[in-house]
Image (tube, rainbow, N blue to C red):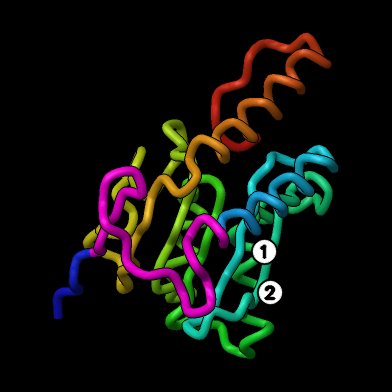
Amino acid sequence: MALKPAKRFDAGTDALPPPPPGWASYEALMELALEDARQAAAIGESPVGAVIVSVHGEVLARAGNAPISSTDPTAHAEVLAIRRAATQMNNYRLLNTTLVVTLEPCLMCLGAIVHARVDRLVYGASDPRTGAVTSRLPGPDLPFLNHRFDVVAGVMAEECGTLLRDFFRSRRSRTGAEPARPGRV
């Protein structure tokens, strides 16, 4: 049986589906993810934050990037939030949930989203180097995947992108290093 194609929405141009109950907008949820991204930056991690919300609008989990501080290369904000939400729900399937993240997910996080059965992904800044949802790969529509999820792209993209650019600019100026490519470190 063929899966329905993922629905895609651009926050800058499209009419968006309604946010989860109790939330006035996707921007309100993205503000929470940005808080976690800022906390990650404060401890030297790439400033990426993620929030998972239930179908009823309850915040199930929040996380910021932590691969450096946890010595775990899989500790991206999305994966950490998925792990915490699964524990909160006592289920590895996060059916009918919305994942809000400040940066377009990478290939690893795409796999976690698919396996967790997240219903909707909302992201801020695109990642032209490693983004596996839209930028480098049409992740939700790959024909061999057994789950599709809807995508809302570009929510507070400027704020999310500025946080990332400022973080990496600051790191380069402190170390005198060559400019890093955009994306995760």
Q: Is residue 146 magenta?
A: no
**Amino acid under disc 1:** Leu
How many numbered marks, from 0 up? 2
Main SS of the magenta segment?
loop
Nearest the eye: 159 or 184: 159
- In the rendered image of this protein, does residue 144 appear above or below residue 59? above
* Quadrant location of the N terminus in the rendered image: bottom left
Read off the residue under disc 2.
84
Is residue 89 toward the left or the right of residue 40 in the image? Answer: left
Asked if marks 1 and 2 touch (Cβ < 8 Å), the reply is yes
Q: Which mark is residue 80?
A: 1
Residue 59 location (% of width, % of height):
63, 75
Name the residue rendered at 48%, 60% in the picture: 26
Packing grade of label 2 (10 A; few <14, some 14-19, many >=20) is some
Q: CA distance from mark 1 to mark 2?
A: 6 Å
The local secondary structure at tag 2 comes to helix
Is residue 122 toward the left or the right of residue 145 in the image? Answer: right
Q: Is residue 16 magenta?
A: yes
Name the residue rendered at 81%, 15% in the picture: 175
Work out which residue is located at the far front of the displayed protein and give it. Answer: 24
Work out which residue is located at the far bottom of the displayed protein and give it. Answer: 90
Name the residue rendered at 42%, 32% in the picture: 128
Q: Quadrant of residue 160?
A: top right
Look at the image and give the residue range highlighted in magenta. 6-29
**Amino acid under disc 2:** Arg
Packing grade of label 1 (10 A; few <14, some 14-19, many >=20) is many
